[in-house]
Image (tube, helix red, strand yellow):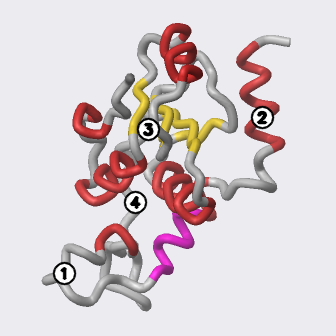
Amino acid sequence: MGEASSHAEDSESDATEEMDTETIAKEMASAKPIESDSSEDNISDAVVVKGPGKHGPLEKLPDFMGSVRCHIHVSESKMAKKLRKYIIAYNGTVDKFLYTDTTYLVTDKDWHPSFSRAHDQMQSLQIVTPEWVLECHKKQTVIDPFDYLVPDD
């Protein structure tokens, strides 16, 4: 079976495990907006809702992560869910496994020999910390991952 059909099967089988883009966009749109604009500390823990609010139409979420394909490898399931939600909501893709077209491995782990093997096989793979996704969300754009790369030993 070809790699493309393998991706499709993985995506279909993950449907019950992961939320689809529309569901996440609705969930994010119905989230309580941040009331205070003076606190930068809250931005990573809440979703900023664009638009007039509860009774009016909401703007469509930006799709700046359309070219991003991530595999999430973090120890805390709450953080993994948050990262997945942000990536999918902004039109990115979350891969259950590392594929040759995966562009980012998001991890909270120290460098591991398996990261070197993955990087050898996928030269364009960037191995970044979860803070990279959070910062992309905060700035509403895909930022340069340089400051968020996991240092290789």
Which label sits in the foreground, 4 or 1? 1
Q: Quadrant of residue 100?
A: top right
Disc marking residue 66: 3
Mark pair 3, 2: CA separation? 19 Å
Q: Name the kind of residue labelled 1 in the image.
A: Ser
Identify the residue position indicated by label 1 in the image.
39
**Front-lying residue, 113 or 98:** 113
Question: How many neighbours does mark 3 have within 10 angstroms: few (below 14), some (14-19), or many (20 or more)?
Answer: some
Question: Can you say which quadrant of the picture contains the N terminus?
Answer: top right
29 within the magenta span: yes
**Amino acid found under the numbered disc labelled 3:** Gly
Disc ID at residue 10: 2
Secondary element at image label 1: loop
Q: Residue at x 81, y 32 (%)?
A: 9
**Magenta residue span:** 24-31
Nearer the observer, 52 or 79: 79
Residue at point 48%, 49% (across, down): 87
Q: Residues within 10 Å of mark 1 (few under 14, many from 20)?
A: few
Secondary structure beneath dot 2 equals helix
Sequence-wise, which precedes: disc 1 or disc 3?
A: 1
The residue positioned farthest toward the left in the image shown: 38
Residue 100 is left or right of residue 57, and the answer is right
- In this rendering, the answer to whether 150 lies above or below 77 is above
Mark nearer the N terminus (3 vs 2) = 2
Where residue 72 appears, as percent x and y from the top left, is 56, 43
Q: Main secondary structure of the magenta part?
A: helix
